[in-house]
Image (spheres, helix red, strand yellow):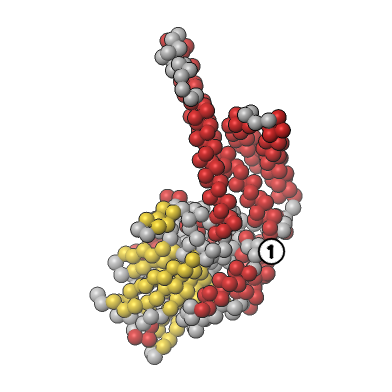
Amino acid sequence: MQRFLPLLFFSAFILIIDLYAWQAVRYISDHGSELVRRFTAVFYWSIPLIALSLMVGSMFTDVSAWPAWFRVYFISIIVFFYILKLVVVPFLLIDDVQRFIRWIILIISDNPKLAGATGKGISRFKFLVYSGVAISGFLGLNLLYGMLRNAYRYKLHKVTVGVRLLPRPFQKFRIVQISDIHSGSFTRKEPVADAVNRINELEPDVILFTGDLVNNVASEVIPFKGIFSGLKAKYGVFSVLGNHDYGDYYQWENLEQKHANLKLLEDLQSEMGWKLLRNSHEIIEIDNHRLAIIGVENWSSKARFPKYGKLDQAYAGAQDADVKILMSHDPSHWEGEVLPLYSDIHLMLAGHTHGFQFGVEIPGFKWSPSQYVYKQWAGLYKQDHQYLYVNRGFGFLGYPGRVGILPEISLIELKSVVG
């Protein structure tokens, strides 16, 4: 019975949304022909039927075995329609609330004029319905554009980070950061391969990947293994694990399977030529000067995400390095542990937020719902002499697109500063 409880709650939830939003859809379709009304009704109510079928199917089959195009696009389109319905619902709720208030006033006062029943002008219901539908349509067009145009539209962000008394060999040291690949969401190889070529053309000294190579299982990256093996940097490609890489969001039959999955992910990265840092570090030495790349496992100050990272363990032995760069998937690690305890870590690189894959970025202004969850959610941040850079993500998760916040390739160049 417990297995079916989520299905019952989900069914009740979407039914309430569908019944409520149907008021607006029916109101508009009633102005059309009989054929239009029938087509609208069939199309509208087919969506909850498909949604429930998918929910039932996910309970009895392995979702990761479903075709990628089906998981990414078909399911997302269903979610897409429910987002649009949820936009309309508050407008209908406003009308219902004001109708209820008018009804109460009418009962108390027995005066229709006090209840607002004048009958003049456009009805509140009509105004709210059309307002809700218009806003929902505008959002829908943007989401559709984000799916068709922006999912693989990689944007290069260039920043310079100042390091006090940076040794000469590391002047203009070029770091390319990528993060949150989520290979299980990809349905196309060509744009991913093009992005890898674009990264190599930057001639980086190092490439640093800050976690979430997959959504759930290691096998998701296998179709793209050859592509990511092509990443080249003078001193190598280094990586850390993100919260999705551990398989914590997948139903394993036993712990042995889960551990084997993580081991496979580590082996695949090694076969791609990547050096996975699991609470460890690597030293790059040039002319007797040392740069430490410190990599920790996922560590978050948010309760719903794990704290596998052991920065003390990763840091041990790197304390004498001239430059220290930390790779940590979750940006909340910066204020949670790095700033108060490790004042000599010059730069931390993170990802995780994806910039919510939705927002606005124009010169001098950026906004995203992500900022209400994470204080540092995209771009470069500084406190005293320490820096944090949060990559907006290379791939996508859930919604197969981007609106306003494009997938990112980061190029970070070090420079010396005094004081």
Q: Residue at x 65, y 31 (%)?
A: 32
Give SS at disc 1: helix
Which quarter of the image is occupied by the N terminus? top right
Visible residue check, residue 276: no
Residue indicated by mark 1: 257
Q: Residue at x 56, y 74 (%)?
A: 196
Q: Nearer the viewer, residue 255 or 208?
A: 208
Q: Find residue 166 and report its image quarter.
A: bottom left
Q: Which percent across, then down, holds residue 344?
A: 34, 73
- In the shown orientation, is residue 49 left or right of residue 28? right
Where is 74 relative to 382, above or below? Answer: above
Q: Which percent across, then down, holds residue 153?
A: 54, 63
Where is 399 relative to 350, above or below? Answer: above
> Farthest front residue?
33
Q: Which percent across, then down, holds residue 154?
A: 52, 66
> Farthest left residue?
419
Q: Nearer the viewer, residue 239 or 260?
A: 239
Q: Find residue 213 and report its image quarter.
A: bottom right
Q: Nearer the viewer, residue 364 or 239?
A: 364
Q: Residue at x 33, y 74 (%)?
A: 162
Q: Residue at x 57, y 43 (%)?
A: 83
Where is 55 relative to 163, above or below? Answer: above
Q: Residues within 10 Å of mark 1 (few under 14, many from 20)?
A: few
Which quarter of the image is occupied by the C terminus? bottom left
> Farthest top residue?
110
- In the shown orientation, is residue 143 left or right of residue 286? right
Q: Amino acid at mark 1?
A: Gln
